Image: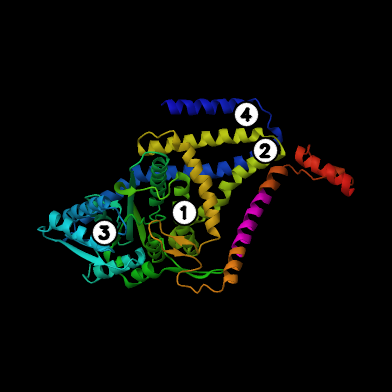
Amino acid sequence: MLGHAAYLMGLALLAMLVAASDLSGSRGAIVVIGALGAWRYSWAALNFTRAVWFRRVVYPKRKAQAFATNKERKQPARAHFLVTSYRIPTDVSLRVYRSVFDAAMAAPGGAQVVASVVDAADARLVQTLFDLHCKDVKGVRLTIDRIPGTGKRDALAAGLRLIAKTCPTRQDVVVLVDGDSCVPIDIVEQSAPFFTDPRVGGLTTDEAAEIAEAGLFQDWFRLRFDQRQVMMCSMGLSGRVLTLTGRMSVFRADLATNPEFIRLVQHDHIDHWRFGRLEFLTGDDKSTWYWLLKQGFEMAYLPDVKSLSMESQPKPSFINSAVTLMTRWFGNMLRTDARALALPRRDIGTFVWWSLLDQRISIWTTLAGPTAALTAALLYDPMILVAYAAWVLFTRYVFCTALSAFRGRGFPITYPVLLYFSQFVGALVKSHVTFRLDRQKWTRQTTVSSFGVGAPQGSSWRKVARQLGTGYLHALAVGWLLLGVFYLVGYDEGICPFRPKRWPHQTICRPKPRFLAMSLAWLRRYSKI
């Protein structure tokens, strides 16, 4: 509480400083920031309203209907768990596989567990744990699939082909699980009923993160999952989510074992106008999502079912860790969203289509706000930065309060600052990745992709030319952003760089900003304008 009190007192102090200042000269920046804020906050309010409606009204009805229909089934669904493990600490693997075996034993129709491992030590660990945990349990079978460490996509494809050999039926389910994520014991019981609707092809659930060391990284991860819960509930109202998370998602078995589904998971790619064919290294969850979206299937969200992932900070510092993870996440998003936007809007839904487009637009609108504030501070009055800081602190605190109310718990005072960090730094990372879609890297693996997986690298001068072209296009986009913001901030009321002597009645000018007036005086003196 002391932290919140100090935060609000500091916010009140900033507000008093702003109230005592004359910011009339910064009207252009205020209009720009206000317009962008009205747009972004109305979008956030819309998603929050949809999330509340889905969580409180729509989802309970859908769940009740799904469970009622499921009771009419003559035979319960059989579950197939596919767990991919690579360089996972032993204590984490023990917890993960215990949770998977518990869920397999609780599956009403029996279960098969496919453990995709690379190291022989992991294979022995899984087998020993299975023998101790559920060797004598009928209906539960373990298959260990040792593969070379060529990546998660190959592991998923090999595991799905093993499951396909068992000839699963349409009412069976496949649960894809990361090697660091624990599944809820009733995951099959809670998820299988939703597949009684033939339109549903996959679903995902709420998530929680367990991080050993308390600090900014822990708060940041929990904040992201709080935001995810609201956004997923909003998308759940439309019957399609924006991703089927790789930590744990559930699929209809006949779809997950479809040869085309498996092929896309293993060899997904896009054809880029500059980089050529880009084979996907990361982002398998985006590939499964895109396949279902393209085939016209709906994707459900279960807000009352939660998986638990054991996360660790990949870099020594918080900022480096956050940027590393955001680079991978946003790269996966940007590589897939473009082709999803190319699908017919009537097939994927207007709201889903606009949400995908908004993910791209928000890159630049997020950067435009602070750019406008900084431009106005340089041209007009530095006090605009104080006003902008007060605005940021106030709006992010309100937003975090809404998130916490949705979750039904409080929040640490670090949340508002971390929220703005995620928005601003995330936009910078997205703008960087937008022009470098060829660069992919796993957090744990050393496998790196640049200029396409398996693509001919070409001569060194071609690599340099590509890098220069990438830098040029990125700089060009940033330049247009700066030019547009400068124009809006400085010319919001028809300000002219100079007042023409002819037709003075046709030009409406107000006093010029100090910086601009000094520049024009210098030009008049030395150029005789």
Disc 2 and disc 4: Cα gap in Å? 13 Å
Decide whether residue 481 is among the magenta residues: yes
Q: Position of residue 41 (x, y in %)?
A: 52, 42
Q: Amino acid at mark 3?
A: Thr
Residue at the spot of label 1: 351
Nearer the viewer's eye, disc 2 or disc 3?
A: 2
> Is residue 79 or residue 180 the one in the foreground?
180
Disc 1 and disc 4: Cα gap in Å? 38 Å
Q: Amino acid at mark 2?
A: Ala
In this view, which residue lies farthest toward the left? 136
Residue at the spot of label 2: 377
Disc 3 and disc 4: Cα gap in Å? 58 Å
Look at 34% across and 47% down and name the residue there: 58
Look at 40% across and 45% down and name the residue there: 221
Disc 2 and disc 1: Cα gap in Å? 37 Å
User: Closer to the N terminus: mark 3 or mark 4?
Assistant: 4
Look at 48% across and 73% down and name the residue there: 455
Classify 10 Å Cα crowding around label 2: few (below 14), some (14-19), many (20 and above): some
Residue 18 got which mark?
4
Left or right: 212, with 450 as reference point:
left
Which secondary structure is most common in the magenta stretch? helix
Q: Which residues are magenta?
A: 469-484
Q: Position of residue 20 (x, y in %)?
A: 65, 25
